[in-house]
Image (cartoon, rainbow, N blue to C red):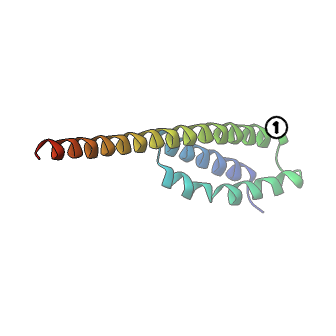
Amino acid sequence: MANPQTLLSDLDQLQHELKQALDNQDWEQLSQLNTRVRPTVEPLMAELEQGRIDATLVRERLEALNRFVAEADAAALKARDEAKASLKGVSQNRNAAKTYQNVSSNRQR
């Protein structure tokens, strides 16, 4: 039987690490930390079902985790859109360079 306070602390620590990774836009670290969410939450839920932990404490943390997920989702969409715009800019620059090269080649003839 796990200590409920330790389980709460483990979830708090994981959420702190997730927040740091998001703040740093470290998507690889976020992905790695994401694999720890279920193994961290499941024992907490088992303790809750057994009545060994206050439901309010668990609910507060799960609500905070849900808010984090929404924030992370928004940040990921923003990063994706920024990358997409950047790639589009690179493509436009490449096309402009090709056009310039074609025009320059035609003038030399």
Q: How many neighbours does mark 1 have within 10 angstroms: few (below 14), some (14-19), or many (20 or more)?
A: few
Under mark 1, the amino acid is Thr
Q: Is residue 72 left or right of residue 104?
A: right
Res 70 quadrant in image = top right
Q: Quadrant of residue 39?
A: bottom right
Q: Position of residue 16 (x, y in %)?
A: 56, 43
The residue nearer to you, when weighing 8 against 42, is 42
Q: Residue at x 55, y 58 (%)?
A: 32
Relative vertical location of residue 68 with respect to residue 42 in this rendering, above or below? above
Q: Position of residue 79 (x, y in %)?
A: 50, 41
- Residue beneath the point at 70% across and 47% down: 8
Residue marked by disc 1: 56
Q: Could you tell me which secondary element the residue under label 1 belongs to?
A: helix
Q: Is residue 75 above or below residue 28?
A: above
Pinpoint residue 33: horizontal percent, then vertical percent.
Answer: 57, 55
Q: Quadrant of residue 108?
A: top left
